[in-house]
Amino acid sequence: MTGTLAVFAPMAWLGPGRHLRDALVVADGDQIVFAGHAAEAPESEEQIELDGFLMPAVADRHVHIALSDPGAALLGGVTAVRDLAWPPDEIFPLADASEGPSFNGPLIRASGPMLTAPGGYPTRDAWAPDGTGREVSNAEDAVAAVSELAARNAGQIKVSLNAEAGPTPDDATLAAIVQAAAEHELPVTAHAQGSGQVERALGAGVSELAHTPWTERLSDDVIRVMAQTMRIVSTLDILSFGRDTPEVRTALDNLRRFADAGGEVSYGTDLGNGPIPAGIHVRELLLMREAGLGPEQIAEAMMRSRLEPGAPADLIGLGQNPFEDLGSFENLLLVVRAGRVVSAVDET
Ligand SMILES: [Zn+2]
């Protein structure tokens, strides 16, 4: 028991549909026990008066944390990440360590290696150390690989469908991956790159794309079906790094139609890939807005979980209201992970 922590703020967003004035969030240990109007709150030991805007902390749902700085990610308001491909003997112990209170970084949920065809992406790519890809040559291999990853507490299964960088798993192998993952109650996320690969993922029942598709404009019909069954992790800025490129234009076009059709978008940066800064990445948010997402959709895509009793006590405080200006995410006043204050700016 670490005692209770109460954060008061004149403005807050507790989750979809819950804008509040004079809000108080109370954590007991690593869990929230109260989130609502200050007047209705219980007593607490430590109290923080935030002179700004309180909201849930951020989950980055696509990172390669070993290529970045976990401590900087946490200080930048990201209290949870999903690592979508790294050698298992490094990433699973790190993920276990991230559960502990002394870990200097966000909570890490890892896929372990990407499942790929022999010689497929990323087995020959410079960024990926040996073991980042796990080669599976048939359905039997695929089932064995998924079982091993499930036993190591993988958070999801990542499959490589990158036809531009080598062979991809055949349809039978892909189907076996999806089925084995379902038996272990693990979602499957795909790196789909090259003509027809998104359609293959969709047809196989993959539940998420790890990137907004950028190699081709998808048809409206495909987008409509995707919006019913798949989630997309944004990763827009890695296609442009702040510039204007044909790749980011194609991705924005796909994402705009996907979101219009009611598809669910998650915030993810592919942190570790190129010069993406650790912490909340405002350029990614600006691109999500350019794809037509509204401020509440963006906030929902970013949040680790809504602030309500029983939820993890992960919060951030900002100097201004981010619903009026996304740049407010660059003015972080407070970061709390698991009920512990990671950083707090003293305004006085
Ligand atoms: Zn990645």
Image: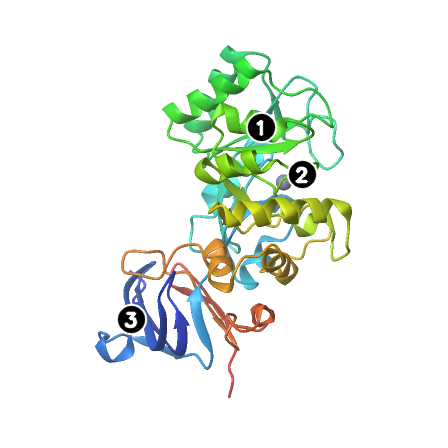
Considering only order in the chain, which callout, 1 or 2, is on the residue closer to the N terminus? 1
Image quarter for ligand 1 = top right
**What number is the disc on residue 223?**
none
Q: Disc 1 vs disc 3: Cβ atoms closer than 8 Å? A: no
- Residue 136, given in percent of the width and then of the height, sits at 58, 17
Local packing at callout 3 (Cα closer than 10 Å; few below 14, some 14-19, many 20+) is many
Check disc 3 and report its element: helix, strand or loop.
strand
Residue wearing tag 2: 217
Q: Can residue 251 be seen in this view?
A: yes
The amino acid marked with disc number 2 is Arg
| Furthest-bottom residue in this view | 348
- Residue 13, given in percent of the width and then of the height, sits at 40, 68
The quarter of the displayed image where residue 304 is located? bottom left
Residue wearing tag 3: 36
The amino acid marked with disc number 1 is Glu
Check disc 1 and report its element: helix, strand or loop.
helix
Which mark's residue is nearer the viewer, 1 or 3? 1
Local packing at callout 1 (Cα closer than 10 Å; few below 14, some 14-19, many 20+) is some
Q: Which of 196 and 140 is in front in this view?
A: 196
The relative height of residue 140 versus residue 107 in the rendered view (above or below) is above
Q: How far apart are marks 2 and 1 (CA)?
A: 12 Å
Considering only order in the chain, which callout, 3 or 1, is on the residue closer to the N terminus? 3
Which mark's residue is nearer the viewer, 2 or 3? 2
The amino acid marked with disc number 3 is Gly
Q: Nearer the viewer, residue 323 or 210?
A: 323
Q: How far apart are marks 2 and 3 (CA)?
A: 44 Å
- Residue 181, given in percent of the width and then of the height, sits at 43, 25
Residue wearing tag 1: 199
Q: Distance between the residues labelled 1 and 3?
A: 44 Å
